[in-house]
């Protein structure tokens, strides 16, 4: 049983952190120490996975055994409290539909898992005003309102942690800010969305079309009923905004990030929706995979360029061979070199791991996810497709026509349906390709992928 000193409950949890070693209360195990009292906002898939662990004595015992103060769930806010989530919620855990009711002196930390950038943002700001630090997995909210939230957290003297917002349970923000603090980040690239990677790798392995695989993924619950944020590259773009904030000091405007490759004679194809089974086959015959790659690079002049588009990647490389719902990221930094992490980038269980680790970190006195970084500026991310680069060009009907003379000088490798170019600007490639009248799709080639 908890035996909290009520006069101490009135202390703002953050201010009390420095005294954590003295300000302890024993719970049932003689070695376990009571940690923060948690209000959980949002009881969806991830919220339920977090609640499960917070309510599980075995989980509490395990974190106590690793020397952590044990967090305690004291309140849940959700609009639908009737739905059965398979949780056995004790009577003393307050359940409310209005998150504001939980922002009182009986709560130390808020875990925001409502999703979206509207009400969730209001909840986080209200928590800050009430003196509560916040853990969130909400990449949408952070990408759209990150600067506002960071400013508000700094102003209120509270902390905001969001490790789970990028690659779920795979630690990347902590290593980027802390363990790589002595290195200068030059490039970030990877597969940051599990849904699209599942779709592309299934299309490739089973030789099926996009619409067919997406429909099946929705039926099986792998893809959202409204998958637009995933398949249009927005979810990965949100994550790239967060990574860029921590790597290069500013919050970028997600709307300025390119999310599609050009197609000759038609509009830009956003995300993966224009990737065809035939493109994946053509790429494979040239030793390439097509992957939705989020990338950003800091150039020597200090500018940053980036994009989230399908790319042609060496099939045997770590990024080219990451299949299914896996995520992978490569951080290229000096003097650290190329550091990569991979693992499950989605799902309740994996995401709850990062959220709860952030709770434990706050409980142990850690700062915000931006660590010691100075307050953020705004960051411009320029279009990654502007400079010369290699391209995979897939042309319907190329075999029948014979290889066009106009592009021959550019081609490094060719088949009957596609070719890979040497580094060339899109403008030059387009100009040469206009000389023949065939539908053509281009994918930038990820260099140095192996
Ligand atoms: N929809 C996301 C994905 C979930 O598929 O990766 C994690 O952000």
Image (cartoon, rainbow, N blue to C red):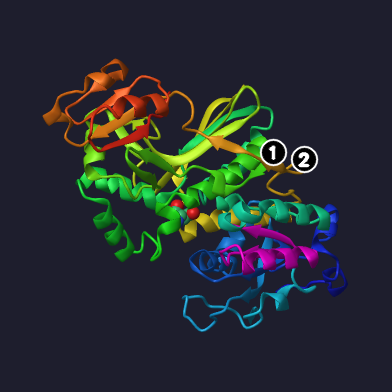
Query: What's the CA distance linking mark 2 and mark 1?
Result: 8 Å
Residue at x 48% of width, y 26% of height: 387
Q: Which residue is mark 2?
A: 374
Relative to 5, residue 278 above or below: above
- On screen, residue 441 versus residue 108, left or right, reads left
Residue at x 20% of width, y 37% of height: 396
- Give the magenta part as a residue range: 109-137
- On screen, residue 129 versus residue 244, left or right, reads right
The stretch drawn in magenta includes residue 197 = no
Quarter in which the N terminus is drawn:
bottom right
Residue 365 lies, in percent from the top left, at 76, 51
Q: Earlier in the sequence, mark 2 or mark 1?
A: 1
**Who is closer to the viewer here, 386 or 416?**
386
Residue at x 40% of width, y 63% of height: 224
Does the image show residue 421?
yes
Q: Which residue is mark 1?
A: 249
In the structure shown, which secondary structural element does the residue marked by tag 2 occupy?
loop
The stretch drawn in magenta includes residue 127 = yes
In the structure shown, which secondary structural element does the residue marked by tag 1 occupy?
loop
**Who is closer to the viewer here, 303 or 183?**
303
Q: Residues within 10 Å of mark 1 (few under 14, many from 20)?
A: some
Count of labels in the image: 2
- Tell me whether circle 2 and circle 1 mark residues in contact (CB < 8 Å): yes
Residue at x 63% of width, y 30% of height: 303
């Amino acid at each position: 049983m908890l035996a909290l000193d009520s006069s101490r409950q009135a202390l703002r949890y953050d201010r009390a952190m420095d005294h954590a070693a003295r300000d302890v209360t024993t719970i049932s195990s003689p070695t376990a120490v009571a940690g923060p009292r948690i209000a959980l906002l949002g009881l969806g898939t991830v919220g339920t996975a977090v609640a499960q662990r917070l309510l599980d004595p075995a989980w509490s015992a395990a974190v106590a055994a690793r020397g952590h103060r044990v967090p305690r769930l004291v309140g849940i806010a959700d609009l639908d409290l009737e739905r059965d989530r398979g949780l056995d919620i004790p009577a003393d855990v307050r359940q409310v539909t209005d998150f504001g009711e939980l922002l009182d002196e009986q709560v130390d930390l808020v875990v925001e898992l409502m999703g979206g950038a509207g009400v969730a943002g209001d909840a986080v700001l209200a928590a800050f005003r009430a003196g509560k630090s916040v853990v969130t997995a909400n990449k949408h909210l952070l990408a759209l309102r990150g600067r506002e939230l960071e400013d508000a957290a700094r102003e209120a003297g509270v902390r905001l942690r969001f490790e789970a917002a990028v690659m779920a349970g795979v630690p990347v923000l902590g290593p980027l800010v802390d363990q790589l603090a002595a290195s200068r980040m030059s490039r970030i690239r990877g597969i940051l969305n599990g849904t699209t990677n599942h779709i592309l790798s299934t299309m490739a392995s089973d030789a099926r079309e996009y619409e067919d695989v997406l429909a099946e993924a929705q039926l099986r619950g792998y893809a959202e009923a409204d998958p637009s944020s995933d398949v249009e590259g927005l979810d990965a773009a949100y994550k790239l905004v967060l990574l860029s904030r921590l790597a290069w000091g500013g919050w970028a405007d997600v709307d300025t990030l390119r999310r599609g490759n050009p197609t000759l004679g038609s509009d830009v194809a956003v995300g993966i929706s224009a990737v065809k089974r035939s493109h994946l086959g053509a790429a494979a015959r040239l030793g390439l995979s097509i992957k939705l790659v989020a990338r950003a690079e800091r150039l020597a002049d200090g500018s940053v360029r980036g994009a989230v588009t399908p790319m042609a990647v060496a099939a045997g490389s770590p990024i080219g061979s990451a299949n299914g719902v896996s995520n992978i990221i490569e951080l290229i930094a000096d003097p650290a070199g190329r550091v990569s992490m991979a693992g499950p980038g989605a799902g309740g269980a994996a995401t709850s791991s990062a959220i709860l680790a952030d709770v434990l970190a706050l409980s142990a006195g850690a700062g915000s996810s931006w660590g010691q970084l100075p307050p953020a500026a705004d960051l411009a991310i320029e279009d990654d497709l502007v400079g010369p680069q290699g391209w995979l060009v897939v042309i319907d009907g190329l075999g029948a026509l014979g290889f066009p003379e106009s592009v021959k000088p550019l081609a490094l490798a060719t088949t009957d349906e596609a070719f890979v170019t040497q580094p060339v600007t899109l403008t030059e490639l387009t100009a040469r390709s206009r000389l023949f009248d065939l539908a053509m799709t281009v994918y930038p080639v990820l260099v140095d992928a192996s």
